[in-house]
Amino acid sequence: MRSKIEATEPEKLSFIEAARRAQIVECAIDVIAGLGFGQASLAQIAKRAGISTGVISYHFDGKDELIRAVVRHVYETGGGFIRPRVDLQSGPRAALGSLIAASVGFIAAYPSHLQAMMNIILAGRSELFDPAMEEPRRAGFRAILQTGQRDGIFRAFDPDIMVDTIIGTLNHIPQRLAAEPELDLEAYSRELVELFDRATRRDDR
């Protein structure tokens, strides 16, 4: 039946398949975030999506491929959320602050996405992450920091260590939010912006 549909309605099938895959990925995120990686079986994900496990198997070659799609989707969603909110025109200090604030804003807007990512990592399945997906975020912070140092706005420090510190701090937030659901992320964001502004700027700024 699949071949027959492909032969007669390839464009419609492509749209339907993309929509179904997206639905499965979103349901996988919700289940992994809520139950943890170990309990997020294909049966649980299928139940959440209101489909059979056979439908998942039609679109994904096992749980690992589905989890890779989840990770890719979270990174792509984060990039789409954060990029338009970063102010590069007002200088490195403003750019750094807006990038940090947008990163926290993404966590606030998509808590399940980040909790699912944390649960995958805590399950020891970091091999499902493509290191190349993290590089744009690291490169964005690194470029801002290096520009600020070149322009004499930021003090001298190792940009890679600072990037590690900023990203490590941001990556801790979903775990903190899971423990404290009422955590004020707006206040948290303001504190982080101020903290890293003080950590990076020259003393006379």
Image: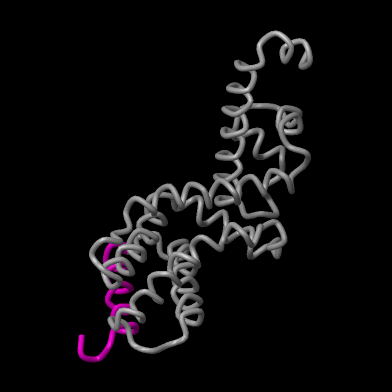
For this orientation, the residue located farthest to the left is 205
Residue 132 locus on image (x, y percent): 62, 59
Whether 91 is drawn above or below 56: the answer is: below
Q: In which quadrant of the rendered view does residue 26 lie?
A: top right
The number of numbered badges drawn on the structure is: 0
In the image, 39 versus 169, the foreground residue is 169
On screen, residue 69 above or below 190 = above
**Most distant residue in the top direction:** 8
Name the side, left or right, on which 48 lies relative to 169: right
Residue 16 vs 127, above or below: the answer is: above
Residue beneath the point at 65% across and 39% down: 45
Q: As displayed, is residue 80 above or below residue 144? A: above
57 lies left or right of 108: right
Left or right, residue 87 beside residue 82: left
Q: Which residue is pictured at 64% across the width and 45% down the height? A: 69
**Part of the protein shown in magenta:** 184-205
Quick one: quadrant of the C terminus?
bottom left
The prevailing secondary structure element of the residues shown in magenta is helix
User: In front: 178, or 95?
Assistant: 95
- Colour scheme of the rendered structure: one colour
For the point 66% across and 57% down, the residue is 130
The picture places residue 47, in percent across and down from the top left corner, at: 64, 33
**Relative image position of residue 178 (x, y in whole percent):** 47, 61
Query: Quarter-wise, where is residue 41 in the image?
Result: top right
Say which quarter of the image contains residue 162.
Answer: bottom left
